[in-house]
Image (tube, rainbow, N blue to C red):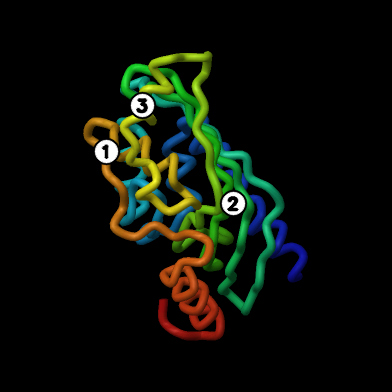
Amino acid sequence: MELEDKFAIAEVIQAWGVYRDQGKWAELRSTFTPDGHISISWFRGPFEQFVSHCQANAASGNTWSRHHLFASTARIAKDRAVAETPVIIRVRQEFKGVPVDLTSCSRFLDRLERHAGGWLIAERAAIYERDRLDPVEPSQDYEKLFLAGGAARFPEQYRYMAFRIAHAPGRKLASVIYRDGGEETADLYARFSAWLAGGAA
């Protein structure tokens, strides 16, 4: 039974990536509980609002992104589970007029609940590990973006993602961003473990 549960959990996590990247919004909503919550670099709040923002971003045509998810590791306690999934996030968009590619090595930490229809994600937090930003083509304009400095003020784990978001019109960084070695990240793991043991979310 546990093997079946682990397969079902992995399936919903992988499905999230497929639906998110292909713009299948109704299907994407079906991977989370109705009161689900998500924390990533540019958003922290209800999952429903996250989907709405993704729809708007996709409609603008300014950004292309893909989530390459790897095998998940899940711990299960009756109708609760905590899963961790390595992910490489790739984003292509214009950064001050220069086409750039962002590559972020991260992982998703998920709280999942078993419902009548199967396992659903109740909460997700992206934990950032390391990233890089590259011009799509060699560009002197790209070099000039860094001459003024500013990137070093962001933590190394999500430095270039933050640098890009900070300069994007209408975008801002989330109030809490989880990263390797961060105090908030240690608290997150402790909270998820306590919940898995029967505590409150």
In this rendered view, identify the residue nearer to me: 84 or 153.
Answer: 153
Between label 2 and label 1, give the one nearer the viewer: 1
Dot 1, crowdedness within 10 Å: few (<14), some or many (≥20)? few
* Residue 87 in view in this figure: yes
Q: Earlier in the sequence, mark 3 or mark 1?
A: 3
The residue to which callout 2 is attached is 13
Identify residue type, mark 1: Arg
155 is higher (above) or lower (below) than 95? below
Judging from the image, what secondary structure is the residue with disc 3 in? Answer: helix
Residue at screen point 53% across, 62% down: 180
How far is mark 3 from mark 1, CA to CA?
Answer: 18 Å
Q: Residue at x 46, y 55 (%)?
A: 32
Q: Secondary structure at mark 1?
A: loop
Rounded to the nearest angstrom, the CA distance separating label 2 from label 1 is: 26 Å
Quadrant hosting residue 38: bottom left
- Please name which of the two marks, 3 or 2, marks the residue nearer to the observer: 3
Find disc 1 in the rendering and name its residue: 171
Residue 117: x %, y % from top left = 55, 58
Q: Which mark is residue 14?
A: none
**Residue drawn at 60 percent across, 47 percent down:** 87
Q: Amino acid at mark 2?
A: Ile
Which is closer to the viewer, label 3 or label 1? 3
Q: Are marks 3 and 2 in contact (CB under 8 Å)?
A: no
Point out the tag, 2 or 1, that comes first from the N-terminus.
Answer: 2
Identify residue for label 3.
145
Considering only vertical position in the picture, is 179 above or below 23?
Answer: below
Q: Spot the residue most to the front.
A: 147
Element assignment for label 2: helix
Count of marks, rendered view: 3
Q: CA distance from mark 3 to mark 2?
A: 36 Å
Q: Position of residue 15 (x, y in %)?
A: 59, 44
Instruction: From this view, report whether residue 25 is shown above or below residue 70.
Output: above
